[in-house]
Image (spheres, helix red, strand yellow):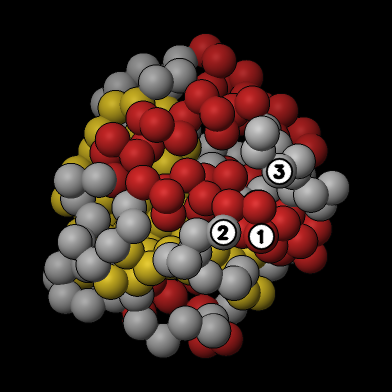
Amino acid sequence: MSDPLPHAARASPSTARNRDPILEVLRPRLPANGLVLEVAAGAGEHAVHFAAALPTLQYQPTDADPGALDSIAAWREHARLGNLLCPLVLDASQPDTWPVERADAVLAINMIHISPWTATAGLMAGAARVLPAGGGLFLYGPFIEGDTPTAPSNLEFDQSLRRRNLEWGIRHLDHLVALAATHGLGLSERLTMPANNLVLVFRKT
């Protein structure tokens, strides 16, 4: 019988649904070894799942929220994976204060639509600073594309986000591409995912 989860460990049904499709995308696109930096790792469930599936990579989860950091630490204690590092405090909007100097890949899952645009700008700047040439920034979530009809469910979700916080909302792909370009990041791949989500892969040029 497995050990019971610590009280601080959070769980999300959406993570159980999306973690395997995301892993299928990441597995052939991540380097064979090195460090993966997850920004806004939330509860830590993705971190545990990916670290277990990718044992040759060091996995560094981060978040700015104390409750999230406690949850990540609890999941890490429960999983006991040697390649899953202690969670670090990281505010995406403050790239000059990031506690990681270098990463071989940067990952942000369901972050940029539930944070201010300044967090997205900081994410791009920070990723450009820590990634090597050719290194990837992977973004997962819903996006609005000018030449593709937006699913009604995503439009409703966008409106609900903006009602909760005027600085939140589903981001436009062309705005992200333009922002990334200012930091030397180019859109390499756009990958369709279940439930009207995408994975966007930006590479440092």
Q: Quadrant of residue 204?
A: bottom left
Marks 1/2 in contact by CB < 8 Å: the verdict is: yes
Is 5 above or below relative to 146? below
Q: Earlier in the sequence, mark 3 or mark 1?
A: 3
**Where does residue 47 sit, x and y in percent of width and height?**
51, 53
Q: CA distance from mark 3 to mark 1?
A: 11 Å
Report which residue position mark 2 lands on.
80
Q: Which of these two is toward me, 166 or 69?
A: 69
Q: Which of these two is toward me, 58 or 112?
A: 58
In the image, what residue occupies the spot 56% across and 59% down? 80
Crowding near pointer 3: few (<14 within 10 Å), some, many (20+)?
few
Residue flagged by tag 2: what amino acid is it?
A: Arg
Residue flagged by tag 1: what amino acid is it?
A: Glu
Label placed on residue 3: 3
Label placed on residue 77: 1
In the image, what residue occupies the spot 59% across and 72% down? 86
